[in-house]
Image (cartoon, rainbow, N blue to C red):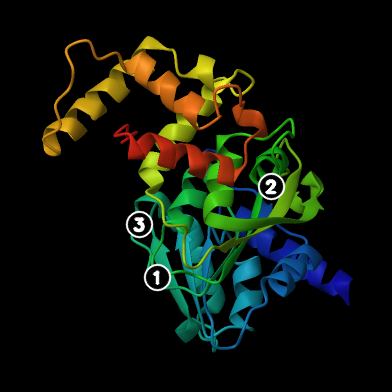
Amino acid sequence: MPKIKAEKKSRIHNEVAKQGIQFNKDFGQHILKNPLIITSMLDKAGLRPTDIALEIGPGTGNMTIKMLDRVKKVIACEIDTRLVAELQKRVQGTPYQAKLQILVGDVLKTELPFFDICVANIPYQISSPLVFKLLLHRPFFRCAVLMFQQEFAQRLVAKPGDKLYCRLSINTQLLARVDMLMKVGKNNFRPPPKVESSVVRIEPRNPPPPINFVEWDGLTRIAFVRKNKTLSAAFKHNTTMAVLEKNYRVHCSLNNKEIPDDFDIKEKVQQILLQAESDQMRARTMDVDDFMKLLHAFNSEGIHFA
């Protein structure tokens, strides 16, 4: 039975090729051709018959068709009009046609409608901005099962102290629970990408942490520029200090707070780090709670990152 499916997939790709459609690597078009991996991704997503599912980069529709079998509706976002036409042709005259909505355009610039779940083999070059677009989307969705470049996936799930632990890791884990599901070899795609891939499950924290994400992002950006240095050293750069001083003066102005003539922002910041017992900590070993405590310490003293 799997062989018949494989031939069917191959036939679809051959038809696309006959029409002169070459997969565009600028759009990160690497079509997932292995039906077993597609089925596994859908199984792990826990799809329900009442779900509205979002798919980003449906390509020739291999995952889309299988998803349409399991959910109430699929919203597919595709930037390539040639593949949009191919997908429309594939569902034309079938019961799937009424269940499929296609959004044509760049997903990063598209206002996404409500959806329950997202399952997608996404273009790897938009991985980071797409993850945060999804996590900041409201109303909340239940979960996303996404294919990423393997190293990017490893960064998403990295823990404090891991070699790949970075700003992406902590920013994502602040907003969501992230789990690695499986590795996927490059030969499962057409054309094969240059890197190995992995599938990740992302489940937004609902309700979200009571924190201003722009402020949080500003703090982690400074701390992770040199993640192996102490925070005391990380907060000594002149450009960083200039921004923090400007923000502090705005804060004082808005709150009618007088600033002493001998005010020194570097001294103020180092004092806060010392009081929070964070001056000798390093970003690479700090978890979400450590950064939340530090952000609160800065904000309570009028130091803001946005």
- Which is nearer the eye, 86 or 193? 193
Q: Which residue is mark 2?
A: 157
Which of the labelled discs sits on residue 139, or is there none?
1
Can residue 207 be seen at all in this image of the molecule?
yes
- Which is nearer the eye, 27 or 90? 27
Tags 3 and 2 in contact by the CB under 8 Å rule? no
Q: Which residue is mark 3?
A: 110
Tags 1 and 2 in contact by the CB under 8 Å rule? no
Identify which residue is drawn at 59% across, 47% down: 29
Q: Quadrant of residue 305?
A: top left
Which label sits in the foreground, 3 or 2? 2
Q: Earlier in the sequence, mark 1 or mark 2?
A: 1
Question: Mark 1 to mark 3: distance in Å?
Answer: 16 Å
Residue 252 placement (x, y as % from top left): 18, 32
Question: Mark 3 to mark 2: distance in Å?
Answer: 27 Å
Give above or below for 190 relative to 303. below
